[in-house]
Amino acid sequence: MSGWSHRHVLDLASFSREDFAAVLDLAQQFRSLPITGARKLPALQGRLVATLFFEPSTRTRSSFELAAKRLSADVMSFSPSSSSLSKGESVLDTARTYVAMGADVLVVRHRSTGVPQQLALDLQQMGERTVVLNGGDGLHSHPSQGLLDLLTLTRFFSPQHPMPEALQGRRIVIVGDILHSRVARSNLWALTACGADVVLCGPPSLVPEDFAAFVDAPPPGLLKDPVPQRGKISVVRRLEHALPGADAVMTLRLQKERMGQQLLTSLKRYHRDFGLSHERMQLCGEDVPVLHPGPVNRGIELSGSLLDDPRVSLVEEQVRNGVPTRMALLYLMAASESATEASLVSSSS
Ligand code: CP
């Protein structure tokens, strides 16, 4: 934990393997805590976490709020429809309002790419200590989802020790609407950092060929990749070719709200070509798990019976893992903040 250097958590491109290991280790510890009896840990006592979701959410927002409460933080949530945004207040002024009320952490979701990053920069330039956690921005990044998916996968392969090494050399297939998916982008950084080879599968309109080179250049803003050796990414057009040899399959929601043009001829045809079912999953072999970040379009990305089959579907497990993963993120940020404060006190004394 001493090596944790992320003041804000805005994407996973800048995470090293050690960063992923730190989150997984803590999340596993939080996951092992009994959920009956004394549910709360005092780590964030006296801290204020505000969830600013300018776009709808069920899982991310609730689980960040529950995670903050489990660490004894105070929590404020914000609802765009009943806020002063409707009177023309800007996103930055909204955020500043919560900072003025003492928010230590802002968890921000916005439909436009870059909003959490811009807020973090603006607040920092104003000299504010408040840290920003990205709860999902546009098509760019959904770091806490990428981390909870990583916990789910590493726990599947190594239930007692969910470390990055558990994914080394694994073949992980991601199917569907990669183009519009911030979840896919976060997973690409996370999975390849852990040494997994990722196969992207979908039609050219949703999986452009250049995604194969997604992690080839250093992450944006960095001169050097913090991960010396990443797994490979490939693009495969047919599910029948992608599934054999898969160790896990993740399918993604078709993001109809982000599709500006007609990218699919029909949903029925999409399900026929790319929908997952028990029959399709037989191409992978035995005991290959299916993940989906939710919300699910039942019968489109995967059949209802596959989604509800606990022998194969890790979808509820992903939701369960969201809380300890977000506890780990909040804890690491609070710990690094305390370390900064401690070093400021010692250097000024
Ligand atoms: N996976 C995910 O981000 O779900 P929500 O939109 O419900 O938060």
Image: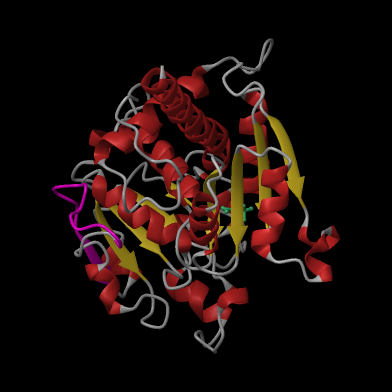
285 lies left or right of 64: left
Q: Could you tell me how many numbered marks the image carries? A: 0
Residue 206 lies, with reference to residue 130, above or below; the image says below
Residue 235 in magenta? yes
Residue 249 lies, with reference to residue 158, above or below; the image says below
Residue 306 seen = no
Pinpoint residue 110: horizontal percent, then vertical percent. Answer: 60, 62
Pinpoint residue 332: horizontal percent, then vertical percent. Answer: 45, 30
Q: In percent of the image, x 38 and y 31: which residue is there?
A: 24
In the rendered image, which quarter is residue 1 located in?
A: top left
Residue 40 lies, with reference to residue 126, above or below; the image says above
Relative depth, front residue between 54 and 196 = 54
Q: Residue furthest top?
A: 37
Q: In percent of the image, x 69 and y 59: which residue is there?
A: 93
Q: In percent of the image, x 49 and y 62: which residue is there?
A: 252
Relative depth, front residue between 178 and 13 = 13
Q: Main secondary structure of the magenta part?
A: loop
65 lies left or right of 221: right
Pinpoint residue 79: horizontal percent, then vertical percent. Answer: 78, 55
Relative depth, front residue between 214 and 203 = 214
Instruction: Work out which quarter of the rendered image holds the C terminus and state it.
Output: top left
Pinpoint residue 189: horizontal percent, then vertical percent. Answer: 31, 54
183 lies left or right of 45: left
Residue range of the region highlighted in magenta in the rendering:
220-236
38 lies left or right of 284: right
Residue 226 in magenta? yes
In the rendered image, which quarter is residue 289 located in?
A: top left
Residue 203 lies, with reference to residue 324, above or below; the image says below
Q: Residue furthest left?
A: 229
Q: In percent of the image, x 26 and y 42: which residue is there?
A: 16
Residue 182 seen = yes
